[in-house]
Image (tube, rainbow, N blue to C red):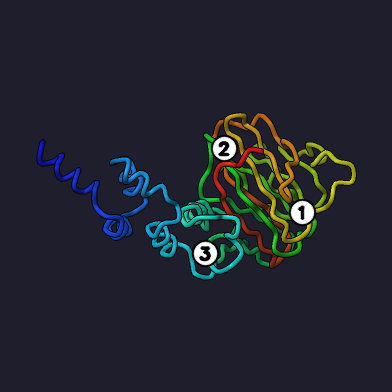
Amino acid sequence: MTGCLAVMAAAANLPPQILESIFSYLNISDLRTCSLVCKKWYKFLNDENNDVWRFHCIRKVTEQVLKSDILKNVPTYKAKLRAFFHNWNLNDCSKNIVVKSGGFTVHRNPVAQSTDGARGKIGFKTGRHCWEVWWEGPLGTVAVIGLATKKASLHNIGYVSLLGGDDQSWGWNLVDNHLIHNGDSQGNYPTLNNAPTYQVGERIRVILDCEDNTLAFEKNYEFLGVAFRGLPDTPLYPSVSAVYGNTEISMVYLGPPLDG
C-alpha cells in the first residue's frame, strides 16, 4: 500500500511538460478520470487552452473548420472539441441531406417536393444547453429550427413544417416567424409588432433548459423570450428542417448558456 501511495505521489508531481506528453495520448474518457486523481491534475486539465486540448482538438476537428469562422464564438480548444462531439449526426438525417466534412454543416440536395431534416449527435435530458444555428443559403418557404426526439420524422413529401409537424418536435419557422408543434401553429414568435425577418447568415442561439422544461431563442445577443414550455423528460436533440435545394445549415454547440 505504501508503495502504491509513493507511485501516486510521484505521478502527481510530474512536471507540466511530461503531463502534456502523457495526457496527449489518452482518450477523452481517460482524461476525465485523470482529472479526478488529484488537485494538480484537475487544475492542469481544467485549463481548456493548454496543449493537451490543442492536440486532441487538432486530431478531431478538420483544419478547414479551425481556420474558418464556424467556431469563432467558441473560445477554447476544449470547447471546440466539445462542439465537435455535439455536431450533426450523419447517420440521423434525411436521405436528401449530406453532412459536410467537419460535421458542423449540413447540405440539402436539390430534390423537388421534399422536406428534409437533421438531428445532432447528442440529445439532452438534464441541465441547460445552448447552441448556435444559422442558414448559409436561401430559406425557401419553410426553414425551421428547434428540437426533436428520436421518434420525430426526418422526411416528408411536399414543402411542410417538418420540424414541429408532430408531437415529437418543436420548431420556429424563420420564414414566417411562427412556432409549430404537433402540426399546429403556436402563434407568432417573437411576440413583437413587425418582428424582423431572418437574414441569411444570422446566428440564432437556441437555449434549452431541461430544469424548467423550456426552449427559448436569442438573436443578435437579444433574448427573444421563451418559445415552448412543458417539454417532455426525454432526450431532446438539436434539429432543423429545410426545403430549399443546395441550402446549408450550420450548428455549433456552446455549452451552458450565460445568464444575464
Please give left or right for residue 120 compared with residue 175 in the image: left
Label 1 Cα neighbours within 10 Å, binned few <14 / some 14-19 / many ≥20 = many
The image quarter in which residue 23 lies: bottom left
Q: Is residue 4 left or right of residue 128?
A: left
Q: Earlier in the sequence, mark 1 or mark 2?
A: 2
Q: Nearer the viewer, mark 1 or mark 3?
A: 3
Instruction: Please state which of the two labelled residues, at mark 1 or mark 2, is closer to the viewer.
Output: 2
- Return the x and y of residue 56 as percentages of the image width and height: 40, 59
Q: At numbered mark 2, what does the secondary structure look like: helix, strand or loop? A: strand
- Which three-letter amino acid code belongs to the residue tagged 3? Gly
Disc 1 marks which amino acid? Val
Q: Is residue 142 visible?
A: yes
- Looking at the figure, which quarter contains the N terminus? top left
Q: Nearer the viewer, residue 81 or 161?
A: 81
Callout 2 amino acid? Arg
How far apart are labels 3 and 2 at the CA level?
Answer: 25 Å
For label 3, the SS is: loop
Label 1 sits on residue: 142
Report which residue position mark 3 lands on: 102
The CA distance from mark 1 to mark 2 is: 28 Å
Count the marks: how many?
3
Does residue 155 sit above or below 111 in this rendering?
Answer: above
* Residue 22 left/right relative to 194: left
Q: Which of 13 and 215 lies nearest the eye of the viewer?
A: 13
Residue 128's disc number = 2
